[in-house]
Amino acid sequence: MAADITLSRQATTTEPATPPGHGPLRRFLGTRHWTFAAGSVIFGTILAVLILGPAIWSLDPAKQDIIQRLKPPSGQYWLGTDNLGRDVFARLVEGGRFTVTIAALSVLISVVIGVSIGILAGRLGGWFEEISMRIVDLLIAIPDTVIAIFLVAIFGPGHVTLIVALTIVGWTPYARLSRGLALQVNAMDYIRAAEVLGMTRRFILIRHFLPNLIRPISAVTFLRFGHKLITVGGLSYLGLGVQPPAPDWGLMLAAAQPYLDRAPMLMIAPGLAIFITALSVTWIGHGLEIDRTKPKD
Amino acid sequence: MWKIALQRVAMLILMMLCVSLLAFLVPMASGSDPARTILLSHGSDLALDPAQVEALRRELGLDQPLPMQFLIWLGNAVQGDFGNSFASRQPVIHEIGSALIVSATLALSALAIAVAVALPMGTLAAMRPGGRVDGGVTLLVQTFVAIPEYWLAPILILIFALHLGALPSSGWFGPTSVILPALALSIRPMAYFTQVTRAAMIDVLNAPYITAARARGLSMPQTVLRHGLRNGSIPVVTFFSLWFASLLGGSVVIEVIFAIPGMGRLFYEAVINKDIPLLQGGFVAIVALAITINTLADILYVVINPSLRGANGR
Amino acid sequence: MTTDHAPLLSVQNLTVASATGGAPLIDGLSLTVRRGEVLALVGESGSGKSLTALSITRLLPRGLRITGGEIAFAGQDVLTMSPAALNRMRGAGIGMLFQQPQAMLDPTARVRTQVAEPLILGKGMARRAAFARVIDLMRNVRIPAPEARAKAHAFELSGGMAQRVMMATALAAEPELLIADEPTTALDVTVQAQILQLLKAEQARRNFAILLITHDLTVVQAFADRIAVMYAGRIVEEGPAAQIMADPQHPYTRALIRCSLLEPEADGRLLSIPGSGATARDIACGCRYAPRCHVVQGDTHLHHRCCGAEPGLIGLGTDHAVRCHASQTQASAA
Ligand SMILES: Nc1ncnc2c1ncn2[C@@H]1O[C@H](COP(=O)(O)OP(=O)(O)OP(=O)(O)O)[C@@H](O)[C@H]1O
Ligand code: SF4
Ligand SMILES: [Mg+2]
C-alpha cells in the first residue's frame, strides 16, 4: 500500500507498454527517449574502441617517422600523421584512454563525495548542513577553471592533481541534489506510512530512498560527464593536466595549433572526439532525465 | 529585511576572509621560495648568491612568522595592495585592473551574442513544447553544450582568419578582434540560456495573465513580446549574472588561444611563472568579483520582479 | 444577416475533448445569448462552465480541442475565423472577466499598460490619448484615485480593485458581449456585491449582453434575464430566470436552488446535494444526474427509463426547456 504512494515527479510506477519487438534490451530502450538509445550506442562504441583498439589494430602512438610528418589521412594512417610523423589515430585512441578515464574517475569520486555530504546535510541538518551548503555556494560562484588552475599552482601539473581539482569543483551539484531529495524524503508521507506499518528503516531506505536518489543522480552524472570531459581537455590544452608525451585529447589539440592551416585534421580529430563523446553522454543523461520527468498518463 | 541583508554581508566578509587565507597560504605551501623565484626570473646566471636571496627575503617580510605575514598581507590587500608582480614588477592591482576591463568586454560581448540567440530560440521552443521546433532546439542545445570552446576557436580561426582572411586570428586591438573569441565563448552560455528561457517561457505562457492578454485581443506574437518575454527573462537575468562572473575569470583557454590580455590569461601566466603576488591577487579578485556579482544578481532579481518588492514590504 | 432577432451569440452542439482522447469534457452543449440580455450559466465546479467560456473565444488551454459543434458571434462563424479576425473579435467584440483577477494581470507590467492595450493595439489609438482614456475607464468602474492606480502593479491591488481593472480593460473597446466567469467567487462578500452592482449599472448604461458564469443562484436571481443550468458538460435546463427560479423543472436545478437560497437546515448545516459533482467524464447510465437524483430513487419504472436512455432537451412553453424524463412524464401527463 505504502509503495503506491509516489513522489510526485521522481517516481514513475507506470508499467511501460511493451514496445514492438521483445527482449529485455528492447524493452529497456523502448521506454526511453531516442537520445538515450543513440547516446548509449555511440558511447558504447567509443568505449569499445578505446579499450580494445590497441589490441585489435596494434597501434603505436609513440612511433615517430619524420619522413611521414603531417600526412593527410590514408589507408595506412587513418587520420594522418602529426608534426613528428606519429599516427594520429593511434594517439587519439591512446589519448582518449587518458581523457575519458580522468573525467570518469573525477565524476565518480565527485558523486560519492557529493551524495554523502548532501545526504548527511539533509538528514543531520544543523551546523553541518549550514557549513556544507555555504561551501557549495562559494564553490559554485567561483569559475571551475580558476579553482583548478589554482590547485595546479600548488601541487604542480599532472593527472592526479587534475582529478583532485575536478573533484573539488565537481561534487557540488550532487550535494545540492541529494540534500534536496533527502529533505523531500524526510518530509515524505510514505516514510511515515511505512513506519506506521512497522517496516524497518533499512527497508524504507532500500525500497524508497535509493531508487528516488539513483534516477536523478544518474541523469545528472551523465549530463555533467560531458562537461567534465571538456574541462579535462581544456586543462590539458593549457599544459596543466596530462603531461606529454602522453597523448591526451586536449594536448593533441594544443599541439595542432601551429599546423592549423597545413594539417587541419590534427585539430579536427581530437576536438571531434571530445565533442562526440560529450554529446553521446549528454544524450544518455537527457534520456534518463526525460524518462524521469515524463508525466504519467 | 535589514537583518537579512546584514547577515548576508557578514557571510560575504567571512567567506572572503577564508578565501584570502587560502590565497595567502597556498602558494607558500607549494614550497617555492618567492625570493629565489624573483631572483631567478630577473637574474641571468643560474647560481644564486645566498646573501642576495637572504636580503630579498627580509625585504619581502618573509623572515616574519607566518601569522604576522598574513596580517600584513591582508592589511595591504584590503587597501588593494597585493605587492608587485614578480614577472612584470608592476603593481598587481594595476595588472588586474587592466585585465578586468579586457575580460569584462569579452564576457559581455559573448553573453550578448548568447542572449541574442537564446531568447528567440528558447521562446520559439516554448510556444509548442514537444513540437518539432522544440525538438530541434533541444538537439541544438545538446550539441552546443558538447562543443569544446577550445575546439570551436581553432575552427573559427581556420575559417574566418586563415581561409577568408576576414577577421584577425589573435590579439586584442579593437572590435574586429573581439568577434571570434566572443563567438567561441558564447556557445555554452547560449545553450544554457536557451534551456532556461525555454523552461521559463513554458511556465509563463501557461500563466493566466497570458490568457487574459489574448482575451484582450492581442495576437500571440504581441502577447509574447509584451507580457511573455519580460516575465520569462527573470530567471535568465540571474543566469546572465552567474555566467558573467564565471567568464570574467574563467575564460582562460580562449584568452590564451587568442592571446587576449584578460583576467584568465593573467592568472594562467601567474601560475606558469610562479608569480605569487599575482596569483594571490588574481585569485582574491576573481572570487571577490564572483561573490559580489552573485549578490548583485539577487538584488537585480528583485528589481526586475516588482511583486517581490511587495512581498518584502518596501 | 444580423437582424435584431438573430442571437448575438449562438453555440450549437459544442463538444470539447482532450487531445489525448477520452470522453468529451463538454458534450453537445447549446446556448444562445441575445443582444443586451444577461444569460446566467450555472453549474457546480467541474461541470465545464469555464471551458465553455474559453471555447467561445477560442482560448482553450493547450491539450484541449473543440471537436464538434458550431459557434457564431454576431453572425460570424467563430470556428472558421482567421487568427486576425479572432483577435479583432476578442479585442472589440467580446470582453472577458475571470475568477482570479490578480492572476490575470501581468505581474511585471503597470495597470495602464494593460488597460490601454485594446485601445492602442486594437483601435490604433495614440499612446498618450489611450492613457488618458484609461483614467476615464478606471473612473467609470469606480476606482478611487485612478491616476495613481494606473501606474500601479498587480500586486499592489486588492482582489476587488484588480477585478475593477479587469472590467475597465474588458469594457475599453465597448464590446457587445461580456463573458464574466465567476467574477466574484474569489472576492470578499461585501466586495462581491459592489462588483455585481457595478456590472449591472454598466450593463444598464451601455446595454451590452452578459454571459454570467456562476454557481451562486442568489447572484442569478438578482440580475439574470435567462438561466442555463449545466451539469456534467451539458445544459440540463434553460429558461427565463424568473420562471426557473420560481418553478424549476429539473431535479438538479431544484437542488441547486434549495442549496443556495434556503436558510441553513434546523441543525445549522447548509443543505448540500448528495453525491459528488460529476464531470462529463464519469457517465453512469442514461441520465448523467441519475446517480444523485432524488426523483428517480424509489421509482422503479422511472429508474428504468432514466438509466436506459439519456433524456433529450424538451421544450416547455416558449422559452423553457429541460432535459429530464420525469418532466417529460409530467408534461405528457398534463
Ligand atoms: N486543461 C485541461 N485539461 C484536461 N482537463 C481539463 C482542463 N481544464 C479543465 N479540465 C476538466 O474539464 C472539466 C471542466 O472544467 P471547467 O474548468 O470548465 O469547470 P468549471 O465548471 O468552470 O468549474 P469551476 O466552478 O471549478 O470553475 C473539469 O473536470 C476539469 O477537470
Ligand atoms: S432523467 Fe431521471 S435521473 Fe435524470 S434528472 Fe430526470 S428524473 Fe433524475
Ligand atoms: Mg471555472
Image (cartoon, coloured by chain):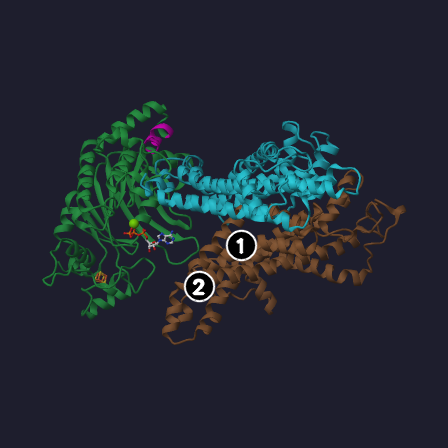
Decide: is B42 above or below A191: above
Residue that carries the numbered disc 2 in the rendered image: A123
- The one nearer the camera, C282 or B291, is B291
A73 in the magenta segment:
no
Tell me the number on the disc at residue B72.
Answer: none
Chain C's colour?
Answer: green
Query: Is residue B247 left or right of C88 when viewed as pictured?
Result: right
Chain letter belonging to callout 1: A
Q: Which chain is brown?
A: A
The quarter of the rendering in which ligand 2 is drawn is bottom left
Residue C80 at least partly seen: yes
Residue type beneath disc 1: Thr
Residue type beneath disc 2: Arg
Residue that carries the numbered disc 1 in the rendered image: A172
Q: Quarter of the image for the C terminus of chain B: give it.
A: top left
C117 in the magenta segment:
yes
Q: Is mark 2 within 8 Å of ligand 1?
A: no
Query: Is residue B218 left or right of C264 when viewed as pictured?
Result: right
Range drawn in magenta: C112-121
| Quadrant of the image occupied by residue C165 | top left
Decide: is A279 above or below C325: above
Q: Residues within 10 Å of mark 1 (few under 14, many from 20)?
A: many
Instruction: Please provide percent x and percent y for residue A128.
Output: 46, 59
